[in-house]
Structure formats: structure tokens, C-alpha cells
Image: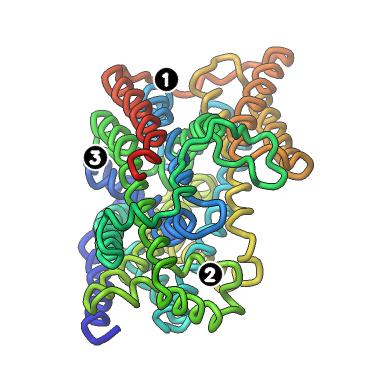
Amino acid sequence: MNIVDYVIIIVYLVGFLGIGYLFKENKSSGDYFLGGRSMGWFPLSLSTMATQLSAISFISAPAFVGLKEGGGLQWLTYEFGVPLAMAFLLIAVIPTLYKSGIVSVYEYLEKRFDASSRLLISFVFQISRSVATGVMVYTMALILQATVGVNFLISILIIGVITLVYSFQGGMKAVIWGDVIQMIILFLGIVICLIYGLSELGGFDNFLTHVDKDRLTAVDFSKWGFNNADKNDEFGFWPMIIGGFFLYASYYGTDQTQSQRLLSASGMPTIKKLLLANGLFRFPLTLTYCIMGLVLGTLLLQDAGFQELLDSTYQTNISSLEGKKADLMVPVFILKYLPNGVIGVLIVAIMSAAMSSLSSTVNSLSAVTMEDFVKRFKPEMSDKAYVFNSRLLSLFWGVVCLAFALFAGEIEGTVIEVINKISSVFYGPILAAFILAILTKKTHALGANIGIVVGVLFNMYLWLYVPEVFWFWWNAIGCLVTMIVAYFVSVIVKKQANEGLPVVYYSGKKEVLILVGFFLFIIAISIALPNILS
């Protein structure tokens, strides 16, 4: 890196301070947490994808595809359930949540059931999301230290302070428009790495000649995810579709970090376009960074100098990077092969991955804390006091996330996998709670709460005592167990069920047909990829 790269990074960071100032006028909860419900589908779509396109997508996913043992294009199967989940949310879930006028998505559970359902799920979200975000910031700071030489603590402080300042000032509008810029930078970074990687390999034809053919298989119909004690039964066709459907329906529909964007839309037509765009654009984006991973992995095997630099970088940081050698592939490639100026842009892309996730998390955590807990004790709070306290909560949760980042080194070796499993323990039962609340009339609060507890406990049992079941299945199993138990208890134990808010259905036959057609298309493309790339 030289002065040009550092200037690019400084301009980027200063620019984001300006974004917070630009959107500093927030007069109510609807302004600060929902952007005044005035956001269009395009910025919301990019913001949604930017939150997803984090460190995992830019750093770890290409490393998994191109370098890690047992990796390859099977990473694409993570996307199979997305279009179907978007179609389901568009018709059955999101219209009711949007029309309810809520800020915290968990507020709907109290209106339909009672406060205990809302507070329990809200609390789980706050703890799990803050820990996960802290680990992500930790990983990015560690990689910046290993490759660029920026001190670990300074990296965390730069990422954290800049993000907190613009999130504190600008609220949801600053977060969304910041995500738009970061998404563009991230995608630009992926394309740059792909182009330079192909150039170093001597072109696309030479890449096809040397690529590891075992990494080209994306779809495996033989793996069912029920014999996974040794992790050799993962990424099967059916568990990734069925489990993925329940995971993404829960994540996009009931996780505050994503549902808050849907609630920020200017109307149902905007939500329709947002869900459609997310269902259609995620796969091409994922395919692009997967191909990038194949290209860089192939280059690594062909270039001894690349291997030596990766090994030396890893050995220098062995105490803090144990188990993450493959994750250094992308940043080491950036420093070795890219010219100055471009290096600065790509380092900014790495920082963007962390800042986008952190800003979204901080704003969402502040929203649910304010709506689910603080307003319970101060319901008559003025708009001015509301915005002031919301900003303080943004700072509080930012500090919490950064604190987790500072101490994540003690557990980081296994925590990413653990967090994924924890999410899958809860995602299914949480989705079931919303399905029961919106799509059934007989389910009452007692039945729903018992169902949620049983669903979570059953998933924990699978985790602890049935390792043969691939964790992706937990999303589906937990949802179905929760729904069956909740409905059965509600039928047996006679109690009056709250009607809650009116249920709204959206007639989106055209969008559903497009999403289902695209689902079939990406399956066909994924099956054909080994032949296309051979």
C-alpha cells in the first residue's frame, strides 16, 4: 500500500461521517428507525443484500469454494431456498406486518398473543445478533492486521467509531444509503478480483484447463443430511432447499435486521419489488463471488509465490489466525496482484463488509430495545425524547458489539459455526410463532409459548444428542414441531385467543410465478455448471 491507497481509505471514512450529518433530521420513531416509511425498492434491495454480503461472502465464501477441503460450488445451494421464501413472505406474512404499523417486528406477537412471546424472542435476538456481529468485526480486524498491518485494536476502533457516528446521527436512512454505497463497493471489489485473477491465470480458457473439477459440482442428490456425524452429509439438495426455505423465510420475515427494511418501504408495491429483487439478484451475486473463489483457488495452486506469501502471512499470525488460513486468500491476493489505488478500493470493500453489518445490527438492536422494553415503562414519551434515547441505545449496542469483538479471540475458533447453529435452533420456532399468529385463529398465547419452548428444546436435543441430523434441517423441524404442539395445546386447553390485528393477504400471482420459475432456473443452472465449466 502507498499514499494513494491511504487517501482512498480516508476519503471513504470521512464520506461516511458526512452521510450521518446529511440525514441527521429525525423527529420520530418512524423517522429514526423506518426512514419515515419513504424508502424506495432500489436502495432497500441493495441495503438488504449489503447486510448479507458481509465478511462471509467477500472473504470466507470464496475461500471455501476455492481452497477449503470439501468446498466448491456446493456453496450455491445456500441460495436454493431464497426465491421460494420470498414468494411465501410476499403472500402470507409481510403484508400483515407492514399494515400493522409496527416498528419492532416482535410487537406483532404481543398484539396477537401476549407480552411474554414478544419479550422472549426479542431478548434472544438481541443477544445472538450482538455476539454474531462482534465476531464478524473481530474477524475483519484480524484480517486487516494480518495483511495490511493495521493494529487490531485500531482496526476495530476505526470500523466501530465511524459506523456508530453515522448510525447515531442519521438513523435508518443513513444506514440504508450507507449500505447502498457499501454494496456497490463490495460488488466492484468482487468483479475486480475476478478480472485480475483471470488475467493472472492467462485467461478464462486457461482457468477452465486447470480448475479442480471436483469443486465444480454444486448439486448432490445423494446427501440427505441425516447421516452427518462426520460432516460428510452436508449440502444435499433436499436439506438445502427445505431447510433453506424455513431459514430464509424466518430471517427475512422475522429477524429485525431484515424485516425493519421491509417495514421502511413506502408501500406494498415497494415491498413487492424489494422481495422480488432479493429473490432474483442474490443467486447471480453469489455465483459471481463463487467463480471468483474458484479462480483465486486455481491461481494459488499454479503460483508458488502466492502460496509462499499466504503461508508466511499465516505463520506470522499463527496465534490469532489459527484455523483461518484459507480466509487470508482474498486479502493476500489483493496485496500481491493488484496495483496501488485499486488496493485501497479493495481494502475499503473489506471494511465495508464489516461496517454494513455493524450499522444494520446497531440500528435494529436499538429499535427492538426501545420498542419492546423502554416504551413499556415510558409509553407517553415525547418524540424528541424517543429519538434522543434511541440514539443513546445505538451507542450502547455499538459498544456492546465492539466489546464482543475485542474478546472474541478466546472463542473465535468455533464460534462462527456455533452461532450458525444457535440461529437455526431459534429460526424455525420463531417463524412458526408468526405463522400461527397470522394464519391461524384458534392458537392462543399459552399454546404458542409452549410450542416455541418445545420447538427450541427439540432442536437443542438434536444438536446435543443427534449429530447425524444436519443443522440446516433444524430450521424446518423446529418450525413444524412448534406449529404442531402449539395448535394441539390450543385445541386441548380451551382459552380465548386474541384476534390481534387484521390479516392482510397480497395477491401477487405474477411475482410468485416469476420467483418459482427463477427457482427452477437456478437449479438447472447449478446442475449444468460442471459441464459448462469443463
Q: Give percent across and percent down for residue 381.
A: 42, 50
Bin the neighbour count of mark 1 within 10 Å (Cα to Cα): few under 14, some 14-19, many 20 and up: few
- Which quadrant would residue 489 be assigned to in this image? top right
Callouts 3 and 1 close, C-beta under 8 Å: no
**Which numbered disc covers residue 325?**
2
The residue beneath circle 3 is 41
The residue beneath circle 1 is 502
Amino acid carrying label 1: it is: Pro
Where does the C terminus fall, quadrant-wise?
Answer: top left
Bin the neighbour count of mark 2 within 10 Å (Cα to Cα): few under 14, some 14-19, many 20 and up: some
Q: Give percent across and percent down for residue 313.
A: 48, 80
Residue that appears at 32% across and 65% down:
349
Residue that appears at 41% across and 78% down:
305
Q: Nearer the viewer, mark 2 or mark 3?
A: 2
- Which quadrant would residue 440 be assigned to in this image? top right
Q: Nearer the viewer, mark 2 or mark 1?
A: 2
Precedes in sequence: disc 2 or disc 3:
3
Amino acid carrying label 2: it is: Lys
As drawn, 57 above or below 306: above
Bin the neighbour count of mark 3 within 10 Å (Cα to Cα): few under 14, some 14-19, many 20 and up: many
Q: Nearer the viewer, mark 3 or mark 1?
A: 3
Q: Secondary structure at mark 3?
A: helix
| Horizontal side, residue 131 vs residue 11: left or right | right
